[in-house]
Amino acid sequence: MRKIKNQEVNSKICVICKKRNAVLYLKASGENICYRCLTRRIERRIFRILKKRIKENSIIIGFRNTSTIVLLHILAKRFKEIEMRKIYMLTDDEILKWVKKRYGFKEVSSKFLEKDRKPFLIIPFSLEEFSATLLNSIMKLNLKHFLISNRAIFPLSKFENKQLEAYAAYYKLPIIPLEEKNSYNEFFCKMEEKTPTIRYQFLSFVNSIKNLTNDHNEIL
Ligand SMILES: [Zn+2]
């Protein structure tokens, strides 16, 4: 039995369905996974996160990245309520505009982001984008924006960019290469050579700090 199992891993069969060829190796869990199981997992997790948190005053922030495209696809597929489909575009990128139109998202102006409207922000960042942004905020002591606010979520931040690109490829969606020039991202890339799961560890560390500070009257 043990011998057969080892052969399966060597030939890279998906550990979930145990049928199809794996296309990605997931560092965090050590799993080899196929397109179909990966896309199902991404959709299920994001749907679960958003189902609990999405509200009528939710606004998606549109970036020039693959995460935004993947998020719009999942929302259009799994949430039928049209009032959920509001996006504030931070870019006038042509691909994004096309995706927005294809899935029937309504573009809102910056006045929807005003505090008195209490918008709930859905921010599409991959693991790489989220960890680099978070580190940047910490270095600049700009934590209030990202940590303390209960009015924003990052539903894609547990997925590496390559997982989201695989999702996009599976559904024939456009892929926008990750901007790697920023120095915070480069820092993580270097750290990953020795500690492949450093970004996950960093996020979980920040999360623990966040809980600690929330327990202590938001000292940050
Ligand atoms: Zn599979």
Image (cartoon, rainbow, N blue to C red):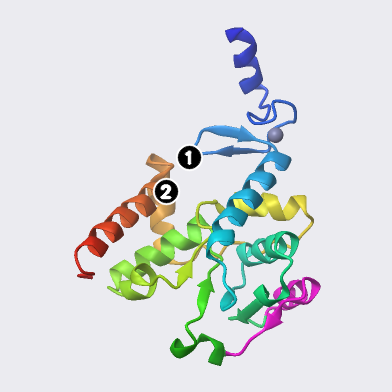
The residue segment tinted magenta is 93-109
The CA span between labels 1 and 2 is 8 Å
Where residue 214 sits: x, y (%)? 26, 64
Establish if 213 lies above or below 202. Answer: below
Find residue 200 and name its label: 2
Q: Label 2 amino acid?
A: Tyr
Quarter occupied by residue 23: top right
Find residue 129 and name its label: none
Q: Which class describes the residues within 10 Å of circle 1: few (<14), some (14-19), or many (20+)?
A: some
Quarter occupied by residue 109: bottom right
Please report contact status of discs 1 and 2: CB closer than 8 Å, yes or no: yes
Element type at mark 2: helix
Establish if 181 lies above or below 21. Answer: below
Element type at mark 1: loop
Residue 20 at least partly seen: yes
Establish if 44 lies above or below 195. Answer: below
Where residue 13 sits: x, y (%)? 68, 27
Quarter occupied by residue 171: bottom right
Find residue 28 and name its label: 1
Confirm whether the magenta stretch covers residue 167. Answer: no
Residue ID at (70%, 30%): 17
Which sits in the foreground, 202 or 111? Answer: 111
Residue 183 at least partly seen: no
Q: Which of marks 1 and 2 is nearer the N terminus?
A: 1
Confirm whether the magenta stretch covers residue 103. Answer: yes
Image-based side of 171 in relation to 92, left or right: right
Where residue 98 sits: x, y (%)? 77, 75
Q: Label 1 amino acid?
A: Ala
Residue ID at (71%, 81%): 106
Quarter of the image with the N terminus in it: top right
